[in-house]
Amino acid sequence: MITARFTARCWGCHSLILDGDAIEREAETGQWVHLDCLPLSQHPDADDPNREVCPVCHTVRTVTGACMCDEEA
Ligand SMILES: [Zn+2]
Ligand SMILES: [Zn+2]
């Protein structure tokens, strides 16, 4: 785990990684993700009862209910 010293986009939840957040480099993709969003590969979207997949863009909604539709809006 490292502490973010920059702003980036989390590969797991697609939310912003902010300066000071606990982050980790995801092994398979090499992308930065929040520590809380790992491990990505061991938690397939369909198996997570707390996450809902958007029927439009087929991405898993974040805890706030956001999805890729909101990104593009
Ligand atoms: Zn995240
Ligand atoms: Zn969507």
Image: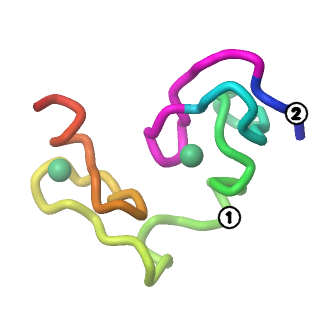
Which one is in front, 27 or 16? 16
What element does badge 1 sit on? loop
Mark 1 vs mark 2: which is more N-terminal?
A: 2
Q: Is residue 71 magenta?
A: no
In the picture, the quarter occupied by the C terminus is: top left
Image quadrant assignment for residue 41 = bottom right
Q: Amino acid at mark 2?
A: Ile
- Image location of residue 12, percent across then percent down: 54, 46
What element does badge 2 sit on? strand
The structure residue drawn at horizontal position 72% and vertical position 38%, both measured from the top left corner, is 21
Task: Name the dominant secondary structure of the magenta segment.
Answer: loop
Label 2, on which residue?
2
Image-based side of 20 in relation to 12, left or right: right
Q: Amino acid at mark 1?
A: Gln
Image-based side of 1 in relation to 34, left or right: right
Q: Is residue 48 above or below residue 1?
A: below
Q: Is residue 7 above or below residue 65?
A: above
Instruction: Give the extent of the magenta segment.
Output: 5-16
Q: Residue furthest top?
A: 6
Q: Residue furthest front?
A: 20
Number of the label disc, if any, that sits on residue 56: none
- Image location of residue 7, percent across then percent down: 59, 19
Q: Residue furthest bottom?
A: 49
Image quadrant assignment for residue 60 = bottom left
Label 1, on which residue?
42
